[in-house]
């Protein structure tokens, strides 16, 4: 028996169907299926959703006579030999006049309950997201006209279905960010991602998310601003202090969350607020032209319990009147709870670090006191010994002088510790520093015989600034280097190796110290970072413990990477990247480059720079988001050429964050995106920036078009 396969149908004049998109996905799918079957006068059918990553199809809606024994719906593989799977793979409709005589797709029969079948793909932006199946007990029931009508239905419902599915995908993506939070950028990164995904998945124009500290009764946004997703006209206005009567204050203090379809009917959203200063500022809803708004407490359940701690508030703002459907309300509530979890996790981590810092400070003060007591008696002891040693004994006097210098050094270190704690009230005064000079200084200080120990250095030329306390980091690195020298002291061919590199995934600089010495015994290895544990008989066993405690308290770590008997040991110091400053006003920078290229793939570095070679442009390369922020903090660029995915994860969208960062800096830097993973939603978000020029795809990249675009952009700025 022959069968008919339909290609992409030409749009015909078919009556539009009516779908209520303000209902949950499952109910909407049943309504779509019912409308589709009515349109072609079919008595039964099903609607299947496609899970692209899992490569499966599953029936989510079914209409028709009940079947005995039916408990669950069948799950198909996109790769199997079924009609629906063929439709997904080929993105084309299929008419099967008689399933009993269709040898190619015999396995797709559903227990003999229908005879003919029509299967049509629902395609959104080139991707099959669902399949509508209509079936009949009558042989050769479906015609080309039925197929065209059902394809018309599929085109009408593609976008509503895709929007509902995107909500589910967005929630899954936020959950991944929450798992990454402890090591990858902390709470601000997660909150920015929540705002971005709410804009992308729900069609919101602007999302703002404010943290609130209940114990201090304050919103920590002054000079910083809330997390923001989408484009707004005035970011500087968002960095002002929150006053009583402001919307965030009212929603939190008066517990007034809600889904407001018409904000003009809500007096607290539009009334005038008395703020300090001679000139009254316009309200946010007025500046941004907001018509509808969702205001949600963090966590969402705080709306129903006055005893629940509120840690923030999130606003979803629409510039056109918007009626919230059930799925959107549920998604926004989930986003709000995810944001609350991120904030609470961050605060828990801050408290843990604060407790650890206090512990380190307490022990440091105690250690300084003991050091003073030990060293304080050394100087008079040396003086007494000098009186009794013959002046001609040069060796004895040289050793006494050495002992005196060591005692002075110990006293100086103790005084330094005590002074820092007394003067600052804390040892911890974090600051951005360059790590390479510190490493070089510590290697110069190292006491070893270069004829007996070979030292290898591998220091990356583009190391990020790190956020730390310099003198403490020197101590940690110095202790590890001293331990490495001691471990190889008796070897005939001793080697030390120090490697420093950026880890853009964890956003830390890693300094690796290796030796080929005796290794660490098994009985010591498991307790290596405990107080009092040492492989050397003449030490107190606090160096590694103190080093790890300090590094963890300041956002880093010390890790034993590997060790083996007579094969040596490798330790890694992890130091967090310095955070890029975000000034509110335009900056006057001395250094100027024409172009900043931000790309993590070295081959594309070469392609882009070679394409512009000989054109007289000054070009700087950054490998990732943090490197780009560092460059933008110091240099004025006329043009930024950047990728969207700035690490090895194609789903990563650091490039969008970088575009937002450039907007916040308020600099005259135009933006061209060259990406291998950009889609229409990314283009829509990028276009929100007034500095955006164009998005080029690496697939089909044209050197000539790229050069012309760059020349036109920079020529237009001259």
Image: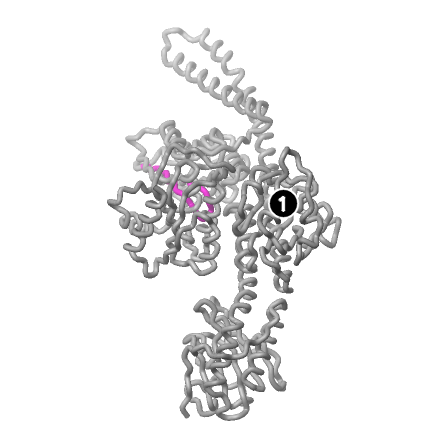
In front of the other: 198 or 370: 198
User: Which quadrant of the rendered structure holds the N terminus?
Assistant: bottom left
Residue furthest left in the image: 614
Q: Quadrant of residue 18?
A: bottom right
User: Which quadrant of the rendered structure holds the C terminus?
Assistant: top left
**Is 313 placed left or right of 372 in the picture?**
right
Q: Is residue 700 magenta?
A: no
Expressed as whole percent of the image width and height from the top left, the position of residue 532 reads 54, 34
Q: How is the image coloured?
A: one colour
Residue in view at x 48 percent, y 17 percent: 408
Expressed as whole percent of the image width and height from the top left, the position of residue 220 reads 61, 40
Residue in view at x 47 percent, y 38 percent: 578
In front of the other: 496 or 551: 551
Residue in view at x 61 percent, y 71 percent: 20
How many marks overall? 1
**Is 289 placed left or right of 408 in the picture?**
right
Which residue corresponds to mark 1?
283
Q: Secondary structure at mark 1?
A: loop
Secondary structure mostly seen in magenta is strand
Expressed as whole percent of the image width and height from the top left, the position of residue 237 reads 57, 41
Residue in view at x 32 percent, y 33 percent: 453
Q: Is residue 499 magenta?
A: yes
Residue furthest right in the image: 306
What range of the chain is rendered magenta? 494-511
Q: Is residue 370 visible?
A: no
Expressed as whole percent of the image width and height from the top left, the position of residue 518 reads 39, 40
Residue 510 in the image: above or below residue 200: above
In front of the other: 703 or 292: 292
Residue 500 in the image: above or below residue 156: above
């Amino acid at each position: 028996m022959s069968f008919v396969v339909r290609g992409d149908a030409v749009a015909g004049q078919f009556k539009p169907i009516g779908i209520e998109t303000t209902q949950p996905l499952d109910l909407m799918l049943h309504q779509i299926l019912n409308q589709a079957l009515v349109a072609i006068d079919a008595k039964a059918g099903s609607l299947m959703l496609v899970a692209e990553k899992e490569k499966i199809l599953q029936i989510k809606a079914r209409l028709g006579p009940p079947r005995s024994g039916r408990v669950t719906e069948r799950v198909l593989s996109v790769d199997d030999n079924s009609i629906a799977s063929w439709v997904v793979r080929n993105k084309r409709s299929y008419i099967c006049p008689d399933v009993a005589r269709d040898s190619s797709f015999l396995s797709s029969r559903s227990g003999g309950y229908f005879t003919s079948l029509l299967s049509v793909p629902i395609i959104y932006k080139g991707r099959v997201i669902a399949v509508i199946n209509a079936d009949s007990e009558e042989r050769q029931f479906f015609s080309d006209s039925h197929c065209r009508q059902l394809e018309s239905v599929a085109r009408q419902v593609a976008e509503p279905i895709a929007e509902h599915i995107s909500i589910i995908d967005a929630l899954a993506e936020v959950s991944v960010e929450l798992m990454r939070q402890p090591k990858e950028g902390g709470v601000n990164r997660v909150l920015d991602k929540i705002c971005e995904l709410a804009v992308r998945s729900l069609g919101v124009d602007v999302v703002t998310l404010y943290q609130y500290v209940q114990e201090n009764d304050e919103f920590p946004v002054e000079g910083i601003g809330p997390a923001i997703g989408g484009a707004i006209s005035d970011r500087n206005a968002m960095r002002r202090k929150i006053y009583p009567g402001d919307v965030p204050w009212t929603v939190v203090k008066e517990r007034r969350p809600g889904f407001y379809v018409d904000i003009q009917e809500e007096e607290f959203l539009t009334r005038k607020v008395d703020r300090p200063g001679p000139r009254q500022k316009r309200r946010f809803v007025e500046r941004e032209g907001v018509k509808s708004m969702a205001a949600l407490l963090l966590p969402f359940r705080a709306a129903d319990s006055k005893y629940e701690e509120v840690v923030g508030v999130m606003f979803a703002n629409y510039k056109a009147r918007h009626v919230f459907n059930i799925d959107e309300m549920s998604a926004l509530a989930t986003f709000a709870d995810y944001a609350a979890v991120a904030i609470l996790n961050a605060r828990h981590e801050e408290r843990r670090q604060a407790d650890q810092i206090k512990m380190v400070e307490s022990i440091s003060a105690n250690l300084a006191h003991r050091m003073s007591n030990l060293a304080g008696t050394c100087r008079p002891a040396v003086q007494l010994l000098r009186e009794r040693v013959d002046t001609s004994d040069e060796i004895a006097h040289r050793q006494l002088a050495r002992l005196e210098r060591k005692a002075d050094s110990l006293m100086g270190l103790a005084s330094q510790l005590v002074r820092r704690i007394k003067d600052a009230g804390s040892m911890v005064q974090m600051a951005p520093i360059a790590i390479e000079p510190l490493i070089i200084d510590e290697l110069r200080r190292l006491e070893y015989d270069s004829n007996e120990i070979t030292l290898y250095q591998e220091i990356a030329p583009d190391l990020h600034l790190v956020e730390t306390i310099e003198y403490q980091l020197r101590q940690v690195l110095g202790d590890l280097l001293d331990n490495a020298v001691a471990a190889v002291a008796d070897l005939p061919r001793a080697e030390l190796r120090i490697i420093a590199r950026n880890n853009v995934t964890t956003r830390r600089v890693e300094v690796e110290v290796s030796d080929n010495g005796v290794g660490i015994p098994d009985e010591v290895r498991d307790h290596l970072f405990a107080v009092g544990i040492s492989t050397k008989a003449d030490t107190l066993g606090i160096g590694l413990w103190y080093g790890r405690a300090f590094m963890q308290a300041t956002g880093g770590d010390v890790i034993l990477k590997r060790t083996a008997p007579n094969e040596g040991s490798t330790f890694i110091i992890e130091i967090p990247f310095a955070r890029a400053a975000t000034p509110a006003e335009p900056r006057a920078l001395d250094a100027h480059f024409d172009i900043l290229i931000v790309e993590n793939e070295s081959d594309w570095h070469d392609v882009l720079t070679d394409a512009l070679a000989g054109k007289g442009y000054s070009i700087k390369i950054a490998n990732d988001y943090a490197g780009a922020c560092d460059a933008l903090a110091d240099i004025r660029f006329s043009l930024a050429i950047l990728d969207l995915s700035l690490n090895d994860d194609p789903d990563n969208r650091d490039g969008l964050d970088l575009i937002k960062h450039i907007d916040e800096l308020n600099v005259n830097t135009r933006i061209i995106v060259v990406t291998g993973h950009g889609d229409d939603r990314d283009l829509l978000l990028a276009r929100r920036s007034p500095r955006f020029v164009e998005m080029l795809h690496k697939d089909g990249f044209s050197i000539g078009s790229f050069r012309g675009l760059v020349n036109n952009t920079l020529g237009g700025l001259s």
